[in-house]
Amino acid sequence: MSVTSKYRKKPQGPNLRSLLDYFMALLMIFFGAVILFPEEILGVDYFKDSPLVKGTMKWVIGILFILYGLFRAYRGYLASKSKIDEDDA
C-alpha cells in the first residue's frame, strides 16, 4: 500500500451542521417576521387577543427571533467555512 493511497481523501458530502443552521435561521427569521407583521404575511392577526404578544412585547419577541435567526446563519457560515479549511489542510 503506497503512502498516497493510504491518505487519499474520501469524497465529502455537504456539511449537515451548516445546512441545519441555515434552515433553522430561515425558520427563526420567518417566525420573527410573522410575529411582527402577521396581517401582511398571513392575512389575519392571530396575536390580537393574546395578552403576552401585544405592543412593545410583540416587537421584543419578534426582534429576538430575528436576531437568533441571524446568529444561526452566522454559526452555519462558520461551520461551513471551517469545513472548507479542514478540506484544504
Image: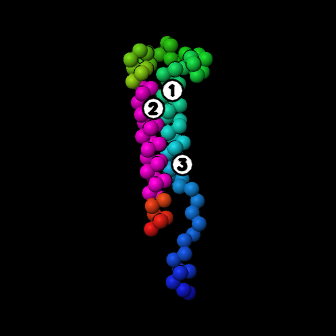
Check disc 2 and report the residue beneath it: 66
Specify few, some or many for label 2: CA neighbours under 10 Å numbering under 14, 14-19, or 20 or more: many
- Residue found at x 47% / y 42%: 73
Most extreme residue toward the bottom is 1
Q: Which residues are magenta?
A: 61-83
Which sits earlier in the primary sequence, circle 3 or circle 1? 3
Q: Is residue 73 magenta?
A: yes
- Residue found at x 45% / y 42%: 72
Q: Between residues 24 and 7, which one lies in front from this camera angle?
A: 7
Q: Main secondary structure of the magenta part?
A: helix
Residue 43 disc label: none
Check disc 1 and report the residue beneath it: 33
Residue 19 disc label: 3
Residue type highlighted by circle 3:
Leu
Q: CA distance from mark 3 to mark 2?
A: 18 Å
Rendering coords of residue 11 (x, y %) = 59, 66
- Residue found at x 44% / y 31%: 65
The image quadrant of residue 70 is top left
Which sits earlier in the primary sequence, circle 3 or circle 2? 3
Residue type highlighted by circle 2:
Ile
